Every structure is written in structure tokens, then in C-alpha cells.
Image (tube, grey):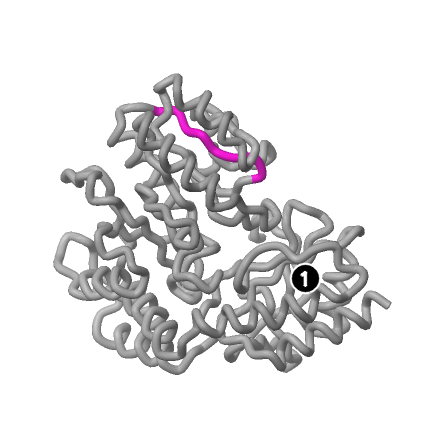
Amino acid sequence: MNLFDVYPLFDITPVKAKDVYVYDDNNSKYLDLYGGHAVISIGHSHPQYVKNISEQVSKLGFYSNSIQNPLQKKLTEKLGKLSGCDEYDLFLCNSGAEANENALKLASFHTGKKKVVAFKNSFHGRTSAAVAVTDNPKIIAPINAQQEVEFLELGDLDGVKTTLKKGDVCAVIIETIQGIGGLDEVDKAFFQGLEKLCRKYNALLIADEIQSGFGRTGDFFAFQRHGVSPDIISMAKGMGNGFPIGGILIHPKIKASFGLLGTTFGGNHLACAASLSVLDVLKDEKLLENTKEISNYFIDKIKVISQVKTVKGRGLMLGIEFDFTIVELRKALIHKHHIFTGSSKNPNLLRILPPLTIQKKHIDLFVEALKSELK
């Protein structure tokens, strides 16, 4: 039997990791500037994270959501306080795709409508409704195409208004900062205009914070800089630092009813222990503040390099754009300099998503490696 071949793989086999470094089976050390798709928020194998999960699994690793789980209540309270979203309710699941799937389903239940507005170059997941609102025809199966979706240009507020006026849209879903699409984002005026249009035409505003949430941009959620209150906020990735967990924050105007949403593994004891550890470390080690400081340092170092066209994104969700494709550059960084980086739909964009524990000395290592390859 073989694995189903769906990912192009680098010839590297990680066996352990610590903070911002990953070690392979030859004991070679790699600087992780990709965080496994923005998943590693508090660093690999953080002692508090390891301790909490180990203690929890020694007591109770799993039981279904048919019984009380005090860790869920604790996570809800701590997340509300740290994120500033106290007024929202929380539904827990296992991944970003599930979070968006449930967000879209809930919007349809609440409004009684089924059409969705999404934006070009978006990526929201690979489950049925989530992939239908993802702008990538290659991964949309015929069965997924039944979903009614209208894709608009990012920033096209007039287009949103024209579409919402028809009265058949249940939700507008938007990545606050596009991830795979290439680190594009809208400005405050657009986001606030989008919120007003959704209120006026009875459509829910879903903020996809799966990559940009949990401190990744220096704010707990990236939308908070725009002064808006989305109806539903989807999150995952950095929420568990590697342990599978996702969720949606739901505005209190959307009422729950028995059987509306459900999950077997969502919010299980180990997942909650992992996420509680993330929240504690984010707060105790002031990682949001570190993210802002390191981001400024990083951008200042990169933007003066002549071959760099622009630096996109915020915090430690950044893209370095060149006038050439970055395929060979990525290969050189990983094989010659032992540095992990990412790519995107934009072939000229090098994506940077390191653990939020990263320090200036690590940025210096990357900058020197980059300069040496660009000579």
C-alpha cells in the first residue's frame, strides 16, 4: 500500500523540533520560517505546551461531547478575555475547513438563504461548502459546484452592493489577509463598508482568521485593526500549535438550537489543553508585542534589498515579492541554508510565517542567506 500522492515533498524527514528549529533524521538543523502553514504559534515543543498535554492525556485523552467538559468552558472564557471577543459564543471543531464549513452552514440556517459572496484568490478549505467558496477550480469537484457562489474582486465594494441588493445572499466570507492567494488585504474603509452592506441586506459577515488569527499579525485577530464586528469569525491553525483544533466565534444575535451543529472530536480534552497552553504562552511571553517588534525589524531589513519589489502582509504573516519566480530560491534556501519558507498562488512571492517566538538573530540569519542567493 502507498500513500495517496497529493503533495510535492522536499526530501527531508523531520524527527524533532524545538522553538524555531526543526531537526531531520540526519540531525541537520533547519530554521522554520514557515511554521507548518502558520500553525506553530508559540514555538515547537514549548515546555508548558508539552507539560499540559502530557498531564491531560495521562488523566483523560478523550470523551465525546455527550458529557460535560470543563476545559471547553475554561477555553471559552480565556479566549474571550484575551481576544476581546467576550460577547461571542464559541463552537469548537477540528480544522479551518470545518470552521468555515460550519460558519457557512450557520449563516444559511440563520438567514434562510443559500448564496454566498466570496473573493477572487481566496482559500477557505477543502470540505464541501468551504471549497466551493475557494477560488481554485482545480480543487472544486463537480459535487462542490452545486453551491451558489459569486466571486468578486477583492476591494470591489460596488460589486458587493450590487450583488447583495438582490436579496438572496446569506453570507459574505473574506480572509482578512489572503494567505495562499498572496498576502493581499483590503483597507479599513472597505471592511467597514462591507459590514454596513451586510447589515443592510441581511447577510452575515464571516471573517476568515484561520491563518491571520491568534496573534499572527500582532493583533489577536487581524480584522480588529479595522474597527468592525463580524457576525462569525473562523479560526484554526495557530489555535492549537500543531494539535488539530478549530472553531468559530458566533455573534449572540445568532441563536443556537439543538442539533444545529455537531462534532465528535471537536473541543476534545487534548485539543482544549493544547489551545489553553497557546493562550497562556501568548499572554505570559507577550508574543503579540514580540510579533509587532520583529515584524518591523524584518521589514526594515528586507525592503532595502534592491531585488525586493515589495513586502506584503502584517506582523509575522508576510510575503516578499520579487520580479522573478521563487521556485529555485526556495529550493536554495532549504537545501543550502536550511531555512523553511513558503509559497503562494503568486509565483513571485516568498511567504514567511514563523513561530511568534522568533528573535532578531533568526531574522539576521535569513537576511544573510537571502542576500547571498540574490547576488
| Mark 1 crowd level (few <14, some 14–19, many ≥20, 10 Å Cα) | few
Q: Position of residue 65 (x, y in %)?
A: 19, 54
Q: Is residue 120 covered in magenta?
A: yes
Which residue is farthest front? 189
| Residue depicted at x 79% and y 70% | 371
Which residue is farthest right? 375
Q: Which residue is mark 1?
A: 10
Q: From the viewer's perspective, tell me whether residue 26 is left or right of residue 44.
A: right
Quadrant in which the C terminus is drawn? bottom right
| Residue depicted at x 29% and y 49% | 249
Q: Is residue 2 covered in magenta?
A: no
Q: Position of residue 2 (x, y in %)?
A: 58, 53
Q: Nearer the viewer, residue 56 or 170?
A: 170
Q: From the viewer's perspective, tell me whether residue 261 is left or right of residue 151.
A: left
Q: Is residue 143 visible?
A: no
Q: Position of residue 359 (x, y in %)?
A: 56, 79
